[in-house]
Structures are given as structure tokens and as C-alpha cells.
Image (cartoon, rainbow, N blue to C red):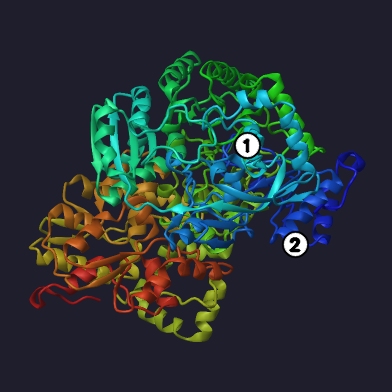
């Protein structure tokens, strides 16, 4: 089959204009195409250092549309670049013409043949989606990259991805059974002969001796084209030759991949070493003990008998995770090997030859999963492992495993020589080392060429040194823009000639992913970190990023954990609802990056920024779930401040900011007449008018004010005696849910403690922060810090009941004010669960109680929920913790234009959990979660303190408002 012939790019005088290109794509039936500033910004980069603006982004809905895109590209002479999840680290998925996103619509598993153990899939299917369907039949797709929750099979084919378990299951090329491909010539091939197949065979046959001796020397020789796959003795596997060609030769229309039996009896042994170099030295002995040759040739479909993985991880990466929470016990050492086996009999022999300082057999599946998550997040965590942000750029070199220790020593010497730091990790059993390096681009404003010049010097030195070890520039990420120019260090002229000849046969017009592999662009061109950044003067202190808004938004490196379809954390709720790149943490960060250092987006007041941030719930889920520590809620607050109040303000605030954004002020004014105000809101015309004036969606209820505030209800309670516990009456607990505070007081008094409520007004300014009213927020926060500081300093525990307000104290107080007391207050106010744990309060009997718990997003991200879970389980409750966000998120879900997304977010996790547990107690400490559940599910909710108080003996219970 052929697409229509065209004269090629020269016939169009350099390609069609954007308008003509967009129109032609639509005339050909490709409806989801976009050339807007927003979309071009979203797709201008992947997970690499490279920024290349596309003309148009196309998201074909079926393969006929994909063929139409290719036809239009050929007719107009426009470059075409394929993209899966956008997690390419070498710049493989950015291009100047048409960028094709297959993940949006081409994500179906077409067929699973359990008997043949194969699956046929579209190129945009996510690895985890295929894995889930295969596992239902006791099978799995073998390779599993660290990005398996979001990477696509098409992307894996493009890069010849491998992952942690390649020792056991091979590379992607070893698991491809057949492909249906459209070449740059227009030929559609699905096996057998054809013009392209015959042409490639002829090229190979003319250089048989060279191909046999230069290619496929070891398993991770991924750089360049896999010419060895075209050898007659290898079956002339054109499908496997195309695997790893990075979209430069053809477009994958669908793929048939091999499945294997899913071994459920895997065991993890962790081996500790003084450093990563000693860990690397141990690898050959481990491979030998497992029966895996250290010089396995490429194409070997199964490796050791039972050895599945041998992964290296540096202590500096683990320390970053430990700083945010618990890490399972690890053996003594500063570098570890995670060794996974399917044969328990291998454990003792491996430990015996390991030379490790210490070892640990991890038997708890939850601990093993936690350790593998650290390894999977390695790319993002490593970016934060050095004082200056560590970057990709030289992150995927591989050597034969018996050369690994020597290579790491030489590599460390190169880092030292160039004044750089890097944290290595990766697939040590395969000789593949990943690393993030703190390349210096800090003088981008004064000398834009200096950073790229230093970058080039280091990378070229590395390439030269690597060649001495017989290594490959890429072990699984592909060459892309990062390494294609360096192929001259790895291959001789005859090999490079073969690459050019193969490209000419498959893509004679050079339209497919130009600048990659053949006729490469310079690897120091189009570097995003080298671009000068606009001098935004933030109001927030942004202490973790040196006060730089530009550095803050550039925390995002594009690893894309926020676009995982089956997320288990909170990030990113809006993307879960819409599946649109602009609604992901990564997408927003890309637009903000363009706003501060690009020529495409015109500053923070640009409409593209507003559109990208519109559906951000400010949930802070990314602050804990993103491996690089992106905090989009903070960046949104600063961007809104700059847009409306900054020195270059471009717009007037919407009414909702003045009403919903200042809710505590209006609640305080309404408190004396709360019953009257509530009665008025029960009148439909009044409520409708109130919603309209406040910018609230008419489908929303208006939360009722408490008849009496917590402070008023408890006035005089406890007398003047010094209490054992102070209760902070945050605005939401005080004015809307005082019963939570009263329940906490009951529990504490039942334990024999004296309790008093802080009578002073002490608002956290949350609603001002989320709407970007930062000048006012700072003033409020400074007063609150001054108010609470003496109570915290007294040594008497202070407890807060509303998690969003307490999280604001912990995370935003030090962002808004330099007052040293802010840090003391931030760490000195406890959640109810933290207080109960610290005081070791007697637990209620919750035996037989089924609990569905929706932790507030801010609690998940800032405070943590483990203390709550521990208390509930120790009390005997059966606990189902809901992942994700409730969808209301303060003013977000109340505002016009957000209702549908708010409901969709609730439907991702919360509402299904509530419906599937109709008899459960629904715990929701946060006001937003309680209002959302009341609006959408009409179910009663309780604060943890209320559940606890409800189980007190009858004589110990008091009256609650």
C-alpha cells in the first residue's frame, strides 16, 4: 500500500504556511489540530533540555487520520515528529513542523491473544493500560520503564526502551512481534517484502562483514540504527530494526508485541556498598552467579535464569525521599543495588558473591513497592539532588557490564575536572547509567553562549572517554537531539554511511523527525536552560528556589508523572478529569516557562497563561507527588498576583476574588446575624442573586454559617487557668464547622486535659492566597504569626482542626513573611491526629466500623495523613483511603465555569468510593470535601474528632453545636 506520491519538500518553497497547513489537515479529516500559542507552548519541549516550537499540533483520532497527516506533510514539505507521552529525555519528541500526539486518541488495546501470548495495540496506548489488561489473563508486557504509568508503547518502540527488568524480559525490540508502519515514502508496510524492505536488505547485504562486527555487540548498544536486525541470520527483522529508530524512518500505525507469564513470586534483595562505584564493581560477579553472561549480545531475548533486575540507586536520591517521609530500612551503605529474582534459590549465591557491606531481603510487598517507587522517581528526584538544579543531557550512556566500574570512575573524574556534580543511578545489571548533572547556565543573561559552551566541552569529553570503554551513547533513551551529533565518536564512517543510506530508503525527503540521527542538529542548539529569563519580581519569597520565579517554574523537567492515567496520589486532578495537556502540572509549567523565558507567550498576563491556570485547583498535590517538587498552587498564586496587582498588571480582578476570595472577612461580618443570613439564603431568589453576584455556579449550594462561632460558644470555658491544650479557631472551623472543634474539646477533656480556644482572630489568609491577593495575604499572615507565636512558644500544644488552614500555616507562612517566628508557628501547630499521637490519648473502640476517608489535598501534600490512618487502624476501624481530590478545592469548584470539571474530578475517586461503601462512615476533615460530598452525594460526613467523640462513654460526651 502507498500513499499518493508527491514531489517532496522542494515543490512547496520551504513548506506550507501555518494557516494553509491547518486548513489542509482539517480538509483531510484531521479535526483535532491546533496552532494556538497555548498548544504550541505545551508541545515545545518534552522531558529533555530542548525547546523547538512546532507549527501545528495534530492529535489523530484513528490511523486513517494519522496517514492523512503524513500525506499532508509530504505534500507540503513540512517536518513531522511523533510524540507519545512526551517523556523523551533526549529531545526525540520535539520538532519544528507538525508534532503528532498519539496519546490523546490512539490509545486502545486492539486485541490480546492469551494463547499466542501477544497483544496488538495502537501507538498511543499507555504501558500501564496494556499491563492492566494483560495481567487480567496472567500475562505481562516485559519491559517496564520507570515512566510505565504514562509512557506509550509507541514511544517505547521509538526509543527501544528497556526499563528496570530488562535482564529478565529484554528490550522493547526483543518483544516486538510485528509492526504496521507508514514510511516517509508513503509505503505502508506490515511484513514481508516491499520497496523499503528490499532496499534495506540490499544495503545490509553490501556490508555484511561490517554489520556483523560493528552492531549488536552488547544488549544496551541502542545508539544509531540497529543494522544487525537486518542480517539474514537474524531473520531480516525489519520491525525490530525500526524499533529504536526514533520516528526518523516511519510512523507506527499499530504494533503486535509479545507477552510473557507474569511472575508473581519475585523477591527483592537490597545490597549496600560504600559508593556507587563499588556497587558497579560488584555487577559482573552477580551476573555470573545468576548465569547471565556479562557480554550478552544484543538481540538476546531472555537473560539470566531468574535474575530479573539489578538496579543501582545513590543515597542522595534516597535522602530526598526520606526528608519528605518514611523510607523502608536499607542496609548499611551510600549506594545500593536493588536485585530482583524470580528464583528464591538465587538469593544466597548472589549475596555470597556480592561483596556488599550489608544486605536485606525485603519480604513485605508494600516495602518492596515503596523502594521501587524511589527508583522509578529517580529522574525527577535526581534533579533536586544537587545545590544547583541537576539536568539531563548526558544521562543514558551504557557500557558492557564488566566495564561499568571503570567507566564510573572515569566519569567521576570528568565531573570533577569540569567542576560539576552528578548523582548516578540506573540499570547497573545492563551497564546503563542514568545521571542528572548540575550544568551551569546561570550566566544566561550576561553571556548566553557561555553555558552551551561549557555544556559542549563536558559532553564531548564524555563521548570520547566512553568510546574507550566500547560504550553506547544511549542505553535506552535514544539519541535524539542530545546525542545524534556525537555518533561520530561511537561509529566509524562506514557505519554512519549505512545510517544515511537507510534514511534515504525510508524517508528520502528527510521529513520525519529531522535533526535526529542522520544530518543531526548541534546538540548544544535549542537548549531551553540557556534562554534568558524575564525578571519577574515575586512577592512570595520562593526560598527553595532562591527567590526566583523563573527557577521555580523550571523545576518541571517534563517527566510527566502528572499525566499518569491511573494515578494513586492527588496530582493532577484537573488532568484526570479532562485528559488535556494544558490541564496537567507539566503543561502549566511549560506555559509558565514560556512566559518567563520564551518569545511565544507574552508574559504572565498572556491569555495562554490564564487558560492554562484556569482549571488548576490549587490543590498542592504536585508539591508532594511531583518528583521535582513543583508547587503549581504557589506559582498560580504568584501569577495571579502579577496579573492583577503586579507592577505590570494587565487586568482587573473578577468579582469572585472579592467575594469568595475574601470569605473569612464576610463570614466574620455575618457572624452576629448568622441565623438571619442563613434564613435569607434559603429563599431561592435571594440565593440565586447572591450566587450571581459572587460568581458562584447556580448549581452550587451556599454553605450555611454556624449559628454560633466556636470562639463565641466556648467563651469563658476553661476559666483563666493555663490549659493543657490550645485550640486554634481557624476561620472555617470557627464560622462554618464549630462542631469539629467542640468534638476535639470533648475528646481532650474526656482524657482529663484542660482545653481552651484561642480567642484572638487568627486567619491563615488561604482564600486570599489562592486568588493571588498576596499583598493582603501577607498582612493577614504576619498578624496571625504574631498572634499564634506566643501560644506556640509557651510549650503548650496548639491544635488546628481545618487541614487546609493548618497546611497554609506550614507551607505558606514562610513564603509570605520573613518573620523568623513564622517557621516556629508553622511547625508548632498540630493536626488532631498528631496531637492525639503525641499525647498518647486512649483510643476509642472502632471495631467493626468501616471508614471511607477523604484526606484534604493540602493535608496529603503538606501535613500527611499517616498519623490519622494509624490511629484509625489501631482503634480497630477498617479504612479505605480515597486517592485524589474531592474536586471542590475552596473557591475553585464554586465558581462559574468550573462546575463540570469539579464534578468530573469527584467522579475519578471520591464518589465511586462513597457509592461502593454505602454503610461506611465518611471521614472528611476539610470543609471543601464536606461541602462537595453534601452537594454531590448527599452523605453525612464527620471530622476525625467527631468520630472519636461519638464513641466516648455517654457520661463523657457534651453538647455540640
Q: Nearer the viewer, residue 856 or 577?
A: 577
Q: Secondary structure at mark 1?
A: loop
Q: Residue at x 61, y 23 (%)?
A: 213
- Left or right: residue 479 versus residue 199 is left
How far apart marks 2 and 1 lie (CA) works out to 27 Å
Q: Nearer the viewer, residue 666 or 493?
A: 493
Across and down, in percent, residue 394 comes to 54, 27
Residue 706 shows up from this direction = yes
Q: Residue at x 31, y 46 (%)?
A: 368
Q: Secondary structure at mark 2?
A: loop
Q: Residue at x 27, y 54 (%)?
A: 866
Across and down, in percent, residue 737 comes to 31, 70
Q: Is residue 182 above or below residue 200?
A: below
- Left or right: residue 427 versus residue 532 is left
Quadrant of the frame with the N terminus: bottom right
Count residues near mark 1 (Cα–Cα under 10 Å), then give few for <14, some for 14-19, many for 20+: many
Name the image quarter holding residue 256: bottom right
Q: Which residue in the structure is indicated by mark 1?
A: 91
Q: Which residue in the structure is indicated by mark 2?
A: 31
Name the image quarter holding residue 239: top right
Amino acid at each position: 500500500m502507498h500513499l499518493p506520491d508527491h514531489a517532496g519538500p522542494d515543490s512547496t518553497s520551504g513548506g506550507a504556511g501555518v494557516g494553509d497547513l491547518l486548513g489542509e489537515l482539517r480538509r483531510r479529516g484531521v479535526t483535532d489540530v491546533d496552532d494556538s500559542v497555548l498548544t504550541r507552548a505545551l508541545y515545545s519541549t518534552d522531558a529533555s533540555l530542548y525547546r523547538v516550537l512546532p507549527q501545528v499540533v495534530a492529535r489523530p483520532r484513528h490511523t486513517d487520520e494519522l496517514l492523512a497527516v503524513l500525506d499532508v506533510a509530504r505534500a507540503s514539505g513540512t517536518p513531522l515528529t511523533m510524540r507519545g507521552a512526551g517523556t523523551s529525555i533526549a529531545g526525540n519528541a520535539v520538532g519544528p513542523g507538525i508534532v503528532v500526539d498519539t496519546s490523546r486518541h490512539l490509545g486502545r488495546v486492539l486485541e490480546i491473544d492469551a494463547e499466542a501470548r501477544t497483544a496488538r495495540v495502537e501507538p498511543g496506548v499507555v504501558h500501564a493500560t496494556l499491563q492492566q489488561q494483560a495481567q487480567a489473563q496472567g500475562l505481562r508486557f516485559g519491559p517496564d520503564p520507570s515512566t510505565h504509568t504514562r509512557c506509550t508503547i509507541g514511544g517505547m518502540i521509538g526509543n527501544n526502551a528497556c526499563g528496570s527488568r530488562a535482564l529478565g524480559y529484554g528490550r522493547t525490540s526483543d518483544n516486538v512481534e510485528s509492526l504496521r508502519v507508514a514510511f516517509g515514502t508513503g509505503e505502508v508496510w506490515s511484513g514481508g517484502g516491499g520497496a523499503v524492505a528490499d532496499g534495506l536488505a540490499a544495503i545490509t547485504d553490501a556490508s555484511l562483514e561490517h554489520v556483523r562486527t560493528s552492531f549488536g555487540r552488547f544488549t544496551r548498544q541502542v545508539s544509531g540504527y540497529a543494522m544487525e536486525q537486518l542480517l539474514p541470520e537474524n531473520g531480516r527483522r525489519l520491525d525490530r530494526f525500526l524499533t529504536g529508530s526514533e520516528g526518523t524512518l516511519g510512523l507506527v500505525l499499530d504494533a503486535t508485541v509479545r507477552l510473557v507469564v507474569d511472575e508473581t513470586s519475585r523477591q527483592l534483595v537490597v545490597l549496600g556498598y560504600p559508593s556507587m562505584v563499588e556497587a558497579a564493581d560488584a555487577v559482573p560477579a552477580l551476573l555470573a552467579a545468576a548465569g547471565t553472561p556479562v557480554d550478552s549480545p544484543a538481540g538476546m531475548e531472555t537473560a539470566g535464569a531468574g535474575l530479573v533486575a539489578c538496579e543501582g540507586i545513590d543515597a542522595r536520591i534516597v535522602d530526598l525521599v526520606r526528608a519528605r517521609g518514611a523510607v523502608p530500612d536499607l542496609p548499611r551503605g551510600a549506594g545500593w543495588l536493588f536485585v530482583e529474582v524470580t528464583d528464591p534459590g538465587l538469593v544466597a549465591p548472589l549475596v555470597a558473591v556480592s561483596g556488599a557491606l550489608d544486605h536485606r531481603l525485603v519480604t513485605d510487598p508494600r516495602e518492596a513497592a515503596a523502594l521501587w517507587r524511589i527508583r522509578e522517581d529517580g529522574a525527577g528526584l535526581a534533579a533536586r539532588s544537587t545545590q544547583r538544579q541537576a539536568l539531563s543531557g548526558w544521562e543514558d550512556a551504557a557500557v558492557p557490564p564488566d566495564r561499568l566500574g571503570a567507566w564510573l570512575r572515569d566519569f567521576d573524574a570528568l565531573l570533577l575536572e569540569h567542576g560539576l556534580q552528578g548523582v548516578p543511578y540506573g540499570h547497573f545489571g545492563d551497564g546503563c547509567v542514568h545521571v542528572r548533572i548540575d550544568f551551569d547556565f546561570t550566566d544566561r543573561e550576561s553571556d548566553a553562549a557561555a553555558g552551551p559552551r561549557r555544556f559542549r566541552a563536558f559532553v564531548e569529553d564524555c563521548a570520547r572517554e566512553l568510546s574507550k570503554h566500547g560504550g553506547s551513547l544511549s542505553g535506552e533513551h535514544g539519541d535524539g537531539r542530545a546525542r545524534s551529533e556525537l555518533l561520530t565518536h561511537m561509529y566509524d564512517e562506514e557505519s554512519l554511511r549505512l545510517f544515511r543510506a537507510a534514511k534515504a530508503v525510508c524517508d528520502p525527503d528527510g521529513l520525519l523527525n529531522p535533526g535526529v540521527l542522520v544530518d543531526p542538529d548541534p546538540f548544544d542548539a535549542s537548549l531551553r536552560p540557556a534562554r534568558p529569563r524575564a525578571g519577574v519580581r515575586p512577592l512570595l519569597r520562593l526560598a527553595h528556589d532562591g527567590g526566583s520565579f523563573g527557577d521555580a517554574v523550571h523545576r518541571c523537567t517534563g517527566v510527566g508523572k502528572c499525566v499518569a492515567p491511573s494515578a494513586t496520589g492527588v496530582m493532577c486532578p484537573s488532568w484526570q478529569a479532562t485528559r488535556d495537556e494544558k490541564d496537567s502540572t507539566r503543561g502549566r509549567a511549560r506555559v509558565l516557562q514560556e512566559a518567563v523565558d520564551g518569545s511565544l507567550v507574552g508574559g504572565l498576563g498572556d491569555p495562554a497563561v490564564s487558560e492554562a491556570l484556569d482549571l488548576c485547583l490549587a490543590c498542592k498535590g504536585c508539591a508532594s507527588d511531583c518528583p521535582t517538587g513543583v508547587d503549581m498552587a504557589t506559582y498560580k498564586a504568584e501569577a495571579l498576583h502579577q496579573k492583577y496587582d503586579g507592577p505590570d498588571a494587565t487586568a482587573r480582578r473578577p468579582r469572585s476574588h472579592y467575594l469568595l476570595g475574601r470569605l473569612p472577612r464576610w463570614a466574620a461580618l455575618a457572624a452576629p446575624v448568622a441565623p438571619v443570613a442563613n434564613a435569607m439564603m434559603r429563599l431561592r431568589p435571594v440565593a440565586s442573586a447572591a450566587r450571581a453576584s459572587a460568581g458562584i455556579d447556580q448549581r452550587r449550594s451556599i454553605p450555611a454559617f454556624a449559628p454560633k462561632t466556636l470562639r463565641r460558644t466556648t467563651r469563658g470555658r476553661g476559666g483563666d487557668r493555663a490549659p493543657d491544650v490550645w485550640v486554634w479557631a481557624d476561620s472555617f472551623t470557627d464560622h462554618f464547622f464549630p462542631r469539629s472543634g467542640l468534638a476535639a474539646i470533648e475528646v481532650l477533656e474526656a482524657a482529663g486535659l484542660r482545653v481552651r480556644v484561642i480567642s484572638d482572630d487568627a486567619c491563615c489568609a488561604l482564600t486570599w492566597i489562592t486568588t493571588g491577593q498576596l499583598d493582603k495575604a501577607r498582612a493577614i499572615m504576619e498578624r496571625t504569626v504574631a498572634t499564634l507565636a506566643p501560644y506556640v512558644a509557651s510549650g503548650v500544644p496548639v491544635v488546628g482542626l481545618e487541614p487546609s488552614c493548618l497546611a497554609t500555616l506550614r507551607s505558606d507562612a514562610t513564603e509570605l513573611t520573613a518573620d523568623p517566628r513564622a517557621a516556629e508557628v508553622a511547625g508548632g501547630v498540630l493536626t488532631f491526629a498528631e496531637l492525639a499521637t503525641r499525647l498518647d490519648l486512649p483510643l476509642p473502640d472502632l471495631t467493626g466500623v468501616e471508614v471511607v476517608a477523604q484526606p484534604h489535598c493540602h493535608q496529603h501534600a503538606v501535613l500527611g495523613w499517616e498519623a490519622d490512618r494509624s490511629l484509625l487502624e489501631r482503634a480497630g476501624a477498617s479504612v479505605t483511603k480515597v486517592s485524589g481530590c474531592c474536586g471542590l478545592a475552596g473557591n475553585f469548584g464554586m465558581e462559574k465555569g468550573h462546575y463540570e470539571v469539579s464534578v468530573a474530578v469527584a467522579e475519578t475517586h471520591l464518589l465511586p468510593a462513597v457509592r461502593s461503601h454505602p454503610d461506611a462512615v465518611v471521614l472528611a476533615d476539610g470543609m471543601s470535601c464536606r461541602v462537595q460530598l453534601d452537594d454531590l452525594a448527599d452523605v453525612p460526613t464527620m471530622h476525625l474528632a467527631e468520630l472519636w467523640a461519638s464513641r466516648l462513654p455517654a457520661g463523657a460526651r457534651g453538647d455540640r453545636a
